[in-house]
Image (spheres, rainbow, N blue to C red):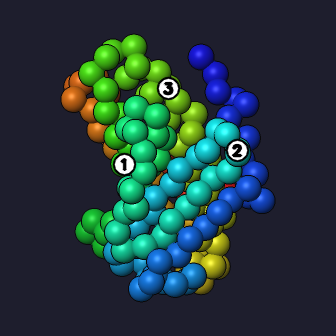
């Protein structure tokens, strides 16, 4: 199953919304991202705030992901959270496959949408990324590494 038509990333089709107290270049602490891709308009939407925006959608139809900066033992990490939300194994497998295709562009969405933060803090491009898939099904309730931000630049 391939979603290559969906995953073409175009930074010109990125809509970024920054909610105070966050600004273009900080703070990093408590900085949270809500990312959504619209297959209808082929746009990526990024909201940056100190909370997640999840006012939308039917969870079966939604494809948003959440991310936040975390500091473990003095090492910054970017952690993504994806809710798979389905008990039907076929739908769950399809959603997992879809997110596996979307996550690299969600990472690019953060890099391009939060570009001023990265200009001020170039060392963040070396940050390791993990994605936590949240599911009631143990097979899909997992954490996967996705390398570092500079790989997706």
Per the image, the residue denoted by label 2 is 42
- Which is more foreground, mark 2 or mark 3? 2
Q: Would you say residue 37 is visible in this rendering?
A: yes
Q: Is residue 122 above or below residue 109?
A: below
Q: Residues within 10 Å of mark 2 (few under 14, many from 20)?
A: some
CB under 8 Å between discs 1 and 3: no
User: Which residue is painted at 37% across and 63% down in the image?
Assistant: 52
How far separated are the C-alphas under marks 1 and 2?
A: 22 Å
Q: Position of residue 46 (x, y in %)?
A: 55, 61
User: Which residue is painted at 65% across and 63% down in the image?
Assistant: 15
Per the image, the residue denoted by label 3 is 97
User: Which residue is painted at 28% across and 65% down in the image?
Assistant: 72
Say what secondary structure mark 2 lies in: loop
Q: Position of residue 65 (x, y in %)?
A: 44, 49
Front residue (pair 113, 130)? 113
Q: Would you say residue 78 is visible in this rendering?
A: no
Relative to residue 14, is residue 104 drawn left or right? left
Say what secondary structure mark 1 lies in: strand
**Image mark for residue 26:** none
Find residue 140 and report its image quarter.
top left
Instruction: Please report whichever mark, 1 or 3, sits nearer to the chain's N-terminal start.
Output: 1
Q: Position of residue 20 (x, y in %)?
A: 45, 83
Relative to residue 71, is residue 43 drawn left or right? right
Q: Quadrant of the N terminus?
A: top right
User: Which residue is painted at 64% across and 72% down in the image?
Assistant: 115
Find residue 73 and report its image quarter.
bottom left
Residue lying farthest top? Answer: 90
Per the image, the residue denoted by label 1 is 81
């Amino acid at each position: 199953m391939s979603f290559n038509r969906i995953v073409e990333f175009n930074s010109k089709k990125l809509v970024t919304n920054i909610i105070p107290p966050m600004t273009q270049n900080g703070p990093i602490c408590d900085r949270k991202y809500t990312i959504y891709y619209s297959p209808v308009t082929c746009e990526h939407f990024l909201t940056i705030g100190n909370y997640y925006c999840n006012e939308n959608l039917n969870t079966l139809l939604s494809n948003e992901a959440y991310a936040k900066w975390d500091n473990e033992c003095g090492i910054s990490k970017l952690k993504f959270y994806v809710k798979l939300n389905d008990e039907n194994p076929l739908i769950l497998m399809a959603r997992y496959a879809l997110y596996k295709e979307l996550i690299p562009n969600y990472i690019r969405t953060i890099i391009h949408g939060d570009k001023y933060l990265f200009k001020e803090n170039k060392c963040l491009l070396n940050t390791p990324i993990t994605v936590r898939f949240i599911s009631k099904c143990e097979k899909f309730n997992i954490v996967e590494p996705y390398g570092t931000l500079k790989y997706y630049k």
